Image (cartoon, rainbow, N blue to C red):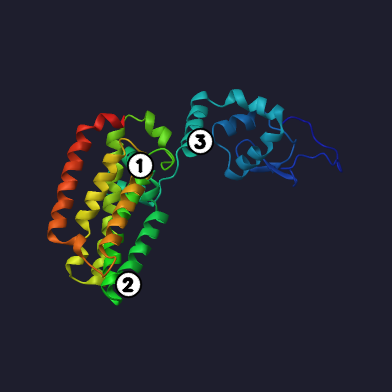
Amino acid sequence: MNQRTNRPGDANRDAHTGTNRDTRTDGHPGRLSGWHMDDGLAVAYAEGRLSSTTAASVEAHLPACASCRELLAPRVPQTRLDRIWSEVVDIVDTPAPGPFERLLRLVGVRHHVARLLAAAQSLRLPWLAGASLALFFAALAAGETTKWGMIGFLALAPIVPVLGVGLAFGRGADPAYEIGLVAPYSAFRVTLLRAAAVLITSVVPALVVGVAFLGQTWAVVGWLLPALALTSLSLLLSRWFEPVQAAAGVSALWLTGVVLTNLHAPSLAMFGGAEQLAYLITTVVSGVLLFLGRREFS
């Protein structure tokens, strides 16, 4: 090592040399002969031959010592530096996948599609937990009270996926909106992928809650066609309005119809056979119009 030792009692000693022991270039303990790296130690460090303790000591010293950095720099192969930098960039720039993204990958969804879906706010735990909790209380009321409770559950269940779809994409709702604009996906494809994912994740907890509290009655699935109709109508309106606005408008229209139908007495008229057929027709017509106008999403 370079013979630039400090005199006894010198207060200006390097921080990492608080003891009288050091290591030789082969990584074995030895007596100190100086406080800075020499050629042998630099080469041993660059080739990865130092013990972990000695390497850590060197790394603690380098940020504060320009001369040792200059000594070490030309001895580290450029290929190794490039590899280390690439690993650092991957760790820093690539976000860790969340639970939903990992689940999608587990079931076989390609990683870039999983990342695209997982960016949606309504596919994250807070939204799913909030929606499930709302459905839980609605189903609880439906199972414990009069027909009003059943109407409340049937009115709420269809708009949960609608609001989720509204929060799944679009300016102001999607945290990855600007990135999605330059992604190699059409806006129409992103819209359908996110909408399908939100619809599935919203329907499943609603069915589970319904079966748990309502048993095997028709009400467990009576809201499915209204949900599909409202969701497809909301997607169609997203051609001209922001998705959140379209979802809010459709949901308000639905709740207004429920209120008007039940002004005088509780009634399940909006969930009868003829009404279910109307919801099916609305779903099909909205889907066709959505497909025909798919270029307007880009």
Residue 262 place in picture, x, y as percent: 27, 65
> Left or right: where does residue 275 sit relative to residue 68?
left
Task: Give, as a three-letter code, the residue at label 3.
Answer: Val
Residue 163 place in picture, x, y as percent: 34, 51
Work out whether mark 3 precedes mark 2 in sequence or the reverse, and give the earlier one: 3
Q: Quadrant of the C terminus?
A: top left
Residue 251 place in picture, x, y as percent: 32, 52
> Left or right: where does residue 14 sit relative to residue 173?
right
SS at circle 2: helix
Vertical order, 31 against 132 (above or below): above
What residue does disc 2 label?
141
What residue does disc 1 label?
243
Cα separation between marks 1 and 3: 38 Å
Task: Give, as a three-letter code, the residue at label 1.
Answer: Pro
Work out whether mark 1 precedes mark 3 in sequence or the reverse, and give the earlier one: 3
Task: Give yes or no for contact between labels 1 and 3 (Cβ–Cβ under 8 Å).
Answer: no
Residue 218 in view in this figure: yes
Residue at image position (40%, 47%) is 121
SS at circle 3: helix
Q: Quadrant of the N terminus?
A: top right
Task: Give, as a three-letter code, the residue at label 2.
Answer: Ala
SS at circle 1: helix
Residue at image position (26%, 48%) is 231
Cα separation between marks 1 and 2: 31 Å
Cα separation between marks 3 and 2: 53 Å
Work out whether mark 1 precedes mark 2 in sequence or the reverse, and give the earlier one: 2
Residue at image position (58%, 44%) is 52
What residue does disc 3 label?
88
Name the quadrant containing residue 120: top left
Vertical order, 106 against 288 (above or below): below
Residue 192 in view in this figure: no
